[in-house]
Image (cartoon, rainbow, N blue to C red):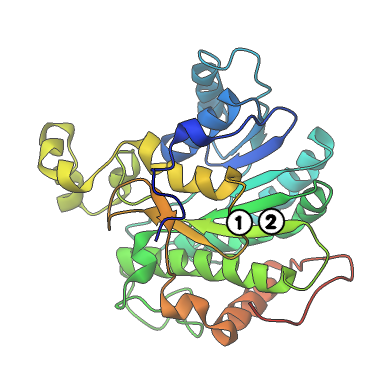
Amino acid sequence: MGKTTTPWTAADIPDLSGRTAVVTGASAGLGLQTARMLAERGAQVVFACRDTEKATGAVGLIRQTALDAELPVLELDLTSLESVRTAADRLHDLVGGVDLLINNAGTLNLERTLTGDGFENTFATNHLGPFAFTGLVLDLLLAAPGARIVTVSSGMAESKRSPLDLDDLAFEQRPYKATVAYAQSKLANLMFSLELQRRLNGTDIELSAVAAHPGISITEFPRNLPLAVRILAHPALRWLFTPIQQTAAMGALPTLRAAVDPTVRGGEFFGPTGKFKGYPVPLEPVAQAMDPETSAALWAASEKLTGVTFDFGGRQSTESA
């Protein structure tokens, strides 16, 4: 399904001098690799992270290959609406516009826990927090011509066993299963991106929403998974999974292509050529993610839960993608 006959690689990232990117969860894994490659191409990269000490350490690593990069750290805890609002206010003090917002941060909780706002933790971190943060910094994105919002989903969003349950987003009525909760939140990521683009269609707003998923990458993420998976993910056993795993740098490429490839259009979804690994290509989203009625209902629920609405400056369209 690729638009080109040659693979899209890091070498295809254009010069980003003068552009500002905000990457959530940039202190490790896919977010760190995404931030690194953006900084190496000249972008100012804001590290929006919960652990600012870890983020500062990551900034030090990136300075080894991007000596003069501007890499401010922004404290952002996506599980807390207060933190999200504070971070959004602080970002307005740091920058005058945002060219790239990359909603990368995510988690998977083995046990059902609630945030201080009363939300199920995985759904709050992966969807509600990013939804609210995006809405609160929307004016900074509108201030940057041609800005993009890239939301990182997962191949697990395609799981037929994990449809979005709008009546039980917090797993109050059904048994909590960590992988099901994660899959639901990642489906919500994809639906959010596609619904946001629907709301941008037919307007004169130079902003686009794109989604991506990284396949299976070698990161710290398996530490969040059940014990059996954590054992299998041990470095000593990593060779067993070579056929379906790729480096974090490769896993970041779908996000980077979604963010900077000039041929990308709003509403597209990028992932690896293979089911689990490979160079980034456009993919067809799962059917439920493309359902405008369900997506609109999720949007309404997200607004109600977070108290955040998106201000498109009176230019919102009623058209559907």
Residue 278 rendering spot, x and y as whole percentages: 31, 47
Can residue 262 be seen in this snapshot?
Answer: yes
Q: Is residue 282 above or below residue 34?
A: below
Q: Is residue 121 above or below residue 5?
A: below
- Report the amino acid beneath label 1: Pro
Residue ID at (41%, 74%): 286
Quadrant holding the C terminus:
bottom right
In the rendered structure, the answer to whether residue 64 lies left or right of residue 221 reads right
Q: Nearer the viewer, residue 168 or 161?
A: 161
Residue 206 rendering spot, x and y as whole percentages: 78, 57
- Report the amino acid beneath label 2: Thr
Residue 153 rendering spot, x and y as whole percentages: 46, 58
Q: How many marks?
A: 2
Quadrant holding the N terminus:
bottom left
Q: Mark 1 Cα within 10 Å, few/some/many (few <14, many 20+)?
A: many
Q: In this figure, which residue is indicated by the disc labeled 2?
A: 134
Residue 103 rendering spot, x and y as whole percentages: 57, 50
Residue 260 bears which disc, if any?
none
Badge 1 vs badge 2, beta-carbon distance below 8 Å = yes
Q: Nearer the viewer, residue 25 or 266?
A: 266
Q: Mark 2 Cα within 10 Å, few/some/many (few <14, many 20+)?
A: many
Residue 67 sits in which quadrant? top right
Q: In this figure, which residue is indicated by the disc labeled 1?
A: 130
Q: Nearer the viewer, residue 114 or 294?
A: 294
Residue ID at (58%, 87%): 293
